[in-house]
Image (cartoon, rainbow, N blue to C red):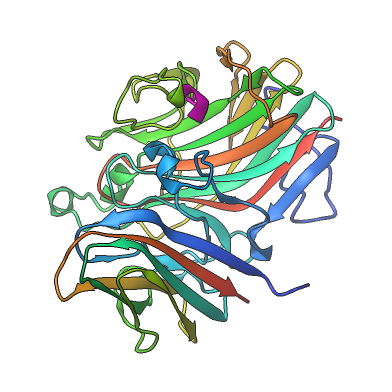
Amino acid sequence: MGSARAGRRPAFSGDPRLSRFNPLPRILFFDDFDEGMNGWCELVGNHTGDLGQIRPIAKDFRPPQLSTCTFFDIGTHGSVDGTYSLKLATRPKENHSAVAIKRMTYAARGRVQFEAYVSFKAELARDTAYAYSWDGNVAPSERHFGEFTFSNDICVGETGPRWHGVIRYRNADPEGNLVQRWVYPTSLEPTTKMERLGLVSAHPRQDFFSFRPEDWAEIPSGRQPLCFNETASKVNWHYVRWLLDTATLRSIEFQCNDLVMDLRSIPSLTHEHEYRGIANLLNVYLAVRTHVNVRNFLYLDSALLSVDW
Amino acid sequence: MLRRSFTAVLEKGATFVSDFETEPYEAGWASEARWFVNVLRADPGITVIAVPQVSPDGSAWCDEGTGRMAVEGTGLVSAALANFGAWLRLRVRMEPYTGRVTVLIHLALKE
């Protein structure tokens, strides 16, 4: 643990698709999006059949897509070892988020690890202001990409406690300044129940994962420029690995390429209310959020969830 | 393996007060598509017209040429498409004037 070279010898060296991962002993799912959606779907807020009941922040998270990464200048880019990747796409609307979820339950409490190969792009918006100062290297489009987020939703036993662990990569701020840091929320991810109890006062809600958009703190040593690669149509894939413990309801570490962050000192916020109907919940979700009126995209070539049960 | 299919909800009970296009949706893996346009509420006298569009890149769009749908008042209509390339969306207009409409729009895709 603690090294980007963790698992130095791949556990599945005979399988090219699995050998790029470092799974715990039991693989719960391995999703190659060349094979389809694999159960990833749009997250939607709770309701009883009336779409008008859905809280506005959780009503329009957009259906995920199977993308070929096709662009106007090069045509189809494709994914790591095939054609398709899972794509989350925001609307071209300030503060809009797209969120996809995969729903499981757990058979035992213990370590859980999510791994994926991801990329992120902003839709090309011909920005004449930046074009005048373009140096031929840094893409103006990079400044249009806001942030992407990994989260879980875990409920212990019949009534909780319930825990949302959340890790976010903030690429740029709304003014287009590059931030390029991993951050964590300092307030709870509000639930439908909390909103109906009137406990969420910030309106209109702008950020699904925290009470207020400013409720985020930097993970120590969490600065990491990623590979946007100069042009809006160049797609480079990044390895991410998030290790957490459902016995202690804490994140343990997060890795992106050569950066491994120890998360054990990061506050772990659990919900104080009782939740029913979600016994042994083990959900994973992915999100992308734009700060500006430009579509933001998060791509996953493949994803793997493993456990130590 | 069974033929893969996926249904995307492009508009989920959203209310519009002007003409609009649905968000671009990638469907290159599918060989057949079927749009469903369900007008849940509409101001009196409005007909909703939905026209399938295609695109080479998700940026530039043109009408596909078939599948025009019309809903006078409220109700559900559908249209099928094939050989549509990799991107789909709907161009939605109101006739004879612009008012307030609430719609549910599904796109059913199949390998």
Q: Is residue B40 left or right of residue A243?
A: left
Quarter of the image with the C terminus of chain A is top right
The span shown in magenta is A189-194
Relative to A173, does residue A186 appear above or below in the rendering? above
Q: How many marks?
A: 0
Q: Do we see residue A171 in this rendering?
A: yes
Q: Say which residue appears at 29% left-offset and 73% top-offset.
A: B91
Q: Position of residue B26 (x, y in %)?
A: 47, 67
Q: Is residue B76 magenta?
A: no
Q: Position of residue A18 (x, y in %)?
A: 77, 50
Q: Position of residue A46 (x, y in %)?
A: 52, 38
Q: Is residue A247 left or right of residue A34?
A: right
Q: Say which residue appears at 46% left-offset and 72% top-offset.
A: B36
Q: Say which residue appears at 28% left-offset and 71% top-offset.
A: B92
Relative depth, front residue between A68 and A56: A56
Residue, far bottom: B65
Quarter of the view holding residue A254? top right
Relative to B106, does residue A113 appear above or below in the rendering? above
Q: Say which residue appears at 39% left-offset and 20% top-offset.
A: A200
Q: Do we see residue A147 in this rendering?
A: no
Q: Is residue A190 magenta?
A: yes
Relative to B9, does residue A22 appear above or below in the rendering? above
Residue, far front: B44
Q: Position of residue B89 (x, y in %)?
A: 38, 71
Relative to B65, does residue A107 appear above or below in the rendering? above
